[in-house]
Image (cartoon, helix red, strand yellow):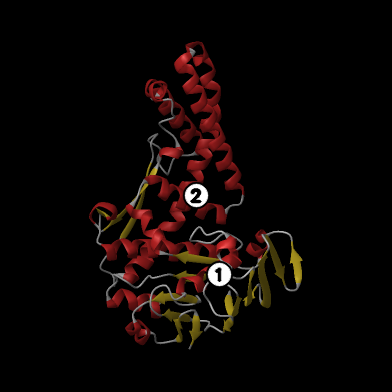
Amino acid sequence: MKVSELSFEKYRNLKDSSIAPSDKVNVIYGENANGKTNLLEAIWLFCGGHSFRGSKENEMIRFGESFFKLGMKFFSQEREQEAEIIFDKGRKLIRINGVDKSSSSYLTEVFSAVVFSPEHLSLIKRGPNIRRRFLDAAICQQRIRYASILSKYNQIINQRNALLKDIYKHSELKDTLSIWDDSLTVVGARILKERFEYLKMLREPALKYHRGISCDKEELEICCICSCGADENDDEGTLRDKLSEALKRSRREDYHTGNTSVGPHRDDLDFKINGISARRFGSQGQQRSAVLSLKLSEAELLYKKNEERPVILLDDVLSELDNSRQDFLLNRVEDYQVFVTCCEESNKEQLKRGKVFYIENGVVGE
């Protein structure tokens, strides 16, 4: 999968123009607030999702204008294709190969990308909910049915928590709790199984990429911390039993707090570098390298699933990485089309194959 041309009109601060990127690595450099991230965001929108910065479409329209238009030519599914995104008067139009589509979701059928932005560092630095969200989102890209399983589980948790709060005032309702426990163990075990299977696939490429980024000085380990004591080698029946027992043990606490204290919604991931917690003891560069390894691994798993390599978007990734780690990202991520933004002009001099784009006040030039 390769982007051959990207055009933009009235989009954020970018001056109306187009670029023809290399099918290798593309370095986009310039001072902050000049539009580098806007370029990556424009490409990401063709994945069919929302902005990776959480922006709404009406916030992407250039000040003083009433609409924006993005166009992209790309090679996918063994042929050249075209897509357009137009947002005008609160309405979004998607056009693929000249045919209007009713939803952005159609874009996911023809184009995919993996993005790293500085916000992704929260994957290691912040709380477990961020790590669970990363894992669940990655699985959803692999298995469409997982989203519905996750939605059903969240509904069960909400119902169980509501019942726990009612039990505080009406103890006679305690007997009905087992109904929700039975549902939770069945759906929860399925979620655990899906997560364990994905982590088994993720570990090998993550280890490979982290060794490459660190010049074989570091090894990345990914561990799952389960609140019910589950093990990734457990079968689904054993997982249900462990969840059931954990729910029984936690009932006293759950009655007191009005919340379900065990289950997949309470689990966490731990990232270790050379056996040491990256969150607690890793440097900024090590933490950034670990997240990059995960993102590159995510791209590799998408390639294995779809038999097409997604485009890789790396926003402000080179800061706080030493020269050897920068060299890996610029010159040794083979077979993928990569877009990298940076502020330092010296970074472009490390690039051996590809193109360099300079951006100033929204004007993009080579």
Is residue 279 something one can see in this rendering?
A: yes
| Left or right: where 108 falls relative to 197 | right
Give the tally of numbered discs.
2
Q: Residue at x 33, y 71 (%)?
A: 213
Label 1: element kind: loop
Q: Quadrant of residue 92?
A: bottom right
Q: Residue at x 51, y 36 (%)?
A: 188
> Mark 1 belongs to which amino acid?
Phe
- Please say if 77 is above or below 118: below
Label 2: element kind: helix
Give the mark nearest the N terminus, 2 or 1. 1
Disc 1 packing (10 Å; few <14; some 14–19; many ≥20): few
Give percent across and percent down for residue 302.
54, 63
Quadrant of the image containing the N terminus: bottom right
| Left or right: where 268 falls relative to 236 | left
Distance (Cα) linking label 2 and label 1: 36 Å
Give percent across and percent down for residue 74.
62, 77
Disc 2 packing (10 Å; few <14; some 14–19; many ≥20): some
| Left or right: where 246 falls relative to 84 | left
The reply to whether the C-beta atoms of the residues labelled 2 and 1 are less than 8 Å apart is no
Q: Furthest-top residue in view?
A: 172
Instruction: Please tell me the numbered disc located at residue 242.
Output: none
Q: Quadrant of residue 113?
A: bottom right
Q: Quadrant of residue 346?
A: bottom left
> Mark 2 belongs to which amino acid?
Asp
**Which residue is labeled 2 in the image?**
136
Q: Residue at x 34, y 50 (%)?
A: 126
- Please say if 65 is above or below 104: below
Instruction: Please tell me the numbered disc located at residue 63.
Output: 1
Give percent across and percent down for residue 86.
67, 68
- Please say if 315 is above or below 331: above
